[in-house]
Amino acid sequence: MNRYLIETTHTKEDCLHVLDLVLAHGFITHYDWGCEEGIHTGWAVVEADSSAEALLSVPPFIREKARAIKLKKYSPEVIQSFHEQM
């Protein structure tokens, strides 16, 4: 299974509604929010088989504005192998 960073952006006007939807969707504890800083975006890391599956963690109301970014960790050995391939 892959890890995805979910980023959901919304407007100030939709903020409370979005929080209510994410709460009802069952993912509120997965998210960190920038709303109190005026950055109306939520971020979560979820495990999924694909970006489409990862986006299912986002309520439909804001899903089309969301994006899922596949995450990858690199070890020092992998970075070294990148240098050797050049």
Image (cartoon, rainbow, N blue to C red):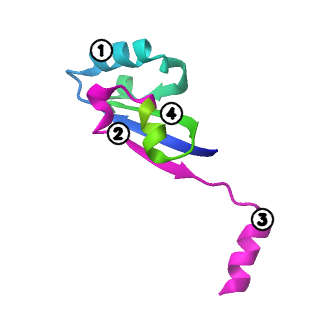
Q: Which residue in the rendered view is the most extreme toward the bottom? A: 86
For badge 2, the amino acid type reads Ala
Q: Which residue is denoted by mark 2 in the rendering?
A: 66
Q: Secondary structure at mark 4?
A: strand
| Relative horizontal placement of residue 7, taking residue 80 as reference (left or right) | left
Q: Which residue is denoted by mark 4 in the rendering?
A: 44
The image position of residue 45, as x and y in percent, is 55, 36
For badge 4, the amino acid type reads Ala
Q: Of label 1 and label 3, which has the lower sequence position?
A: 1
Q: Of label 4 and label 1, which has the lower sequence position?
A: 1
Q: Secondary structure at mark 3?
A: helix
Name the residue at 32% across, 30% down.
40
| Relative horizontal placement of residue 48, taking residue 80 as reference (left or right) | left
CA distance for labels 4 and 1:
18 Å
Q: Of label 3 and label 4, which has the lower sequence position?
A: 4
**Foreground residue among 10 and 49:** 49
Q: Which residue is denoted by mark 1 in the rendering?
A: 16
| In the image, residue 79 above or below residue 66 | below
Q: Secondary structure at mark 2?
A: loop
Q: Nearer the viewer, mark 3 or mark 4?
A: 4
Name the residue at 40% across, 19% down.
22
Q: Secondary structure at mark 1?
A: helix
Label 1 neighbourhood size at 10 Å, few (<14), some (14-19), many (20+)?
few
Q: Which residue is denoted by mark 3 in the rendering?
A: 76
Q: Toward which corner of the image does residue 19 lie, by quadrant?
A: top left
* Magenta highlight range: 57-86
